[in-house]
Image: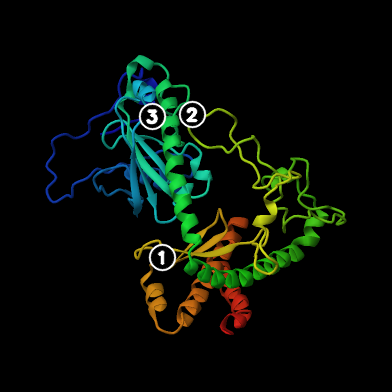
Amino acid sequence: MRLDRSAIDEADGSSVPLEVLEEDAVAAGAPNGTTVRIDGISVRLAKEPIVALIERHLSAFHGSPTVTVNGRVCEILHPAAAWSRVFVPTPTQTKLLGNVSLEISAALRPLDEIHRGVQVTIGTDNLIAIETAGVDSKEYGRQLFGRVDCPELDNPKYDPVAAYTNDRSMKLNKAHPVALALISFIGASLEQARQELVEQGRKAKADAESRRLKETTNKIADILNADLKEFRERLEDVSGAARRRTSIPGDGGGSEESPTEHVVDPDGTQTGREDGIAGENRGESTPGGQDGGAGEGEGEPGGHNASPSATPDAEGDKTIAPAGTGRSRPRGGLSVDYAEFGPDEDRSFWDAEARKITINLDHPVVRAARALPDDEATFRRLSFEIAFTAYAIALADLQFERDPALSSSDATYEIRHALERVWAHAGSLYAV
């Protein structure tokens, strides 16, 4: 078969103008499958976004097709679920959606963006959208995934309003009545599942063993945050002179307070922001007066601080920990924690969005070290090695995001020297 761009441009849209080059040919010895070749592209295409889009569609398939793009095999990943729940719409929603059922599962760890959210299909294997309803921006929201099949989205009585977009965003169109009702149904269901995860997490954190494990991760985090602070200051010292000579517009360096604000004071006289290394975590309320929970409620999405500024709390003194018993996470830094991700997952997981290193307690090596009768000495030392290695690799990744022109030798240098620095300060961890 052949399809030319000129034939597409001349077509009236009623059919796809395919040209048959060969039909009913004998393919003795050739493997089953279809080869798609695209010629005449005048721009350079990045392979990764194309592979990611194909993998997103393949994840909705019930079978296991094999797809390659320029030799790169697309992976079909189905996240392992800790538990699953089935939700049905309200009678009012059923009038628009029909008798549909929504299955939501909780993954063992936070999912990449391509795998989180609810897959929306119209018929078997026909993925048309992925919807999170904003729940993935909340605590534990990135661990939720699911699927729902809604044939009513293709009901011709709503034409010409499309139920979903035709671009790579794969979002439902809120202007479509069925799509709007489905978003509300998905959002309320995801929020209910998320609340269950929140409650489970709260109970786990209250466990005595979790507190003991946290003592170890806090010590590791202290060393890593101290190194991260020194690393940032060293970068600022190296580039400070050049950056002060050339003032960079704020909108050229990413998201800033104002497009007119400069990243660096040309005169070098500014004292800097008071909160955090780069102004992170300032105590400002997010827009909106209520939590941005998904569902059918009214009000603008947003959130609020845990304790609003200048608002007296009659019970506040009861929640204050005695002196010396509390511990706060350094502003602008990273944290280290433990979790159970399953024996097939890696030893650690780096969450770039949350700046968090999580050690997998289910990994065979970690589980074996934890079972040794040595008062967890081997387990703690293995935790140091895993966290330090994950930190060094994450630091190299952050450097690559800062400067994509870095080579593999640059990344190796960053990893090696990061490990040298943190291990040089790790002596205190063994004095237990």
Q: Which residue is mark 2?
A: 296
Which of the two residues, 126 or 3, is positioned nearer the viewer here? Answer: 126
| Residue at 60 percent of width and 31 percent of height | 300
User: So how many labels did they put on this image?
Assistant: 3
Is 31 placed above or below 415 here?
above
Q: Amino acid at mark 1?
A: Asp
Q: Quadrant of the N terminus?
A: top left
Q: Is residue 13 left or right of residue 187?
A: left
| Residue at 37 percent of width and 27 percent of height | 90
| Residue at 78 percent of width and 44 percent of height | 261
Q: Amino acid at mark 3?
A: Arg
Q: Which residue is mark 1?
A: 346
Of badges 1 and 3, nearer the viewer stands 1
Q: Is residue 199 left or right of residue 92?
A: right
Q: Which residue is mark 3?
A: 5
Q: Disc 2 and disc 1: Cα gap in Å?
A: 39 Å
Of badges 3 and 2, nearer the viewer stands 2
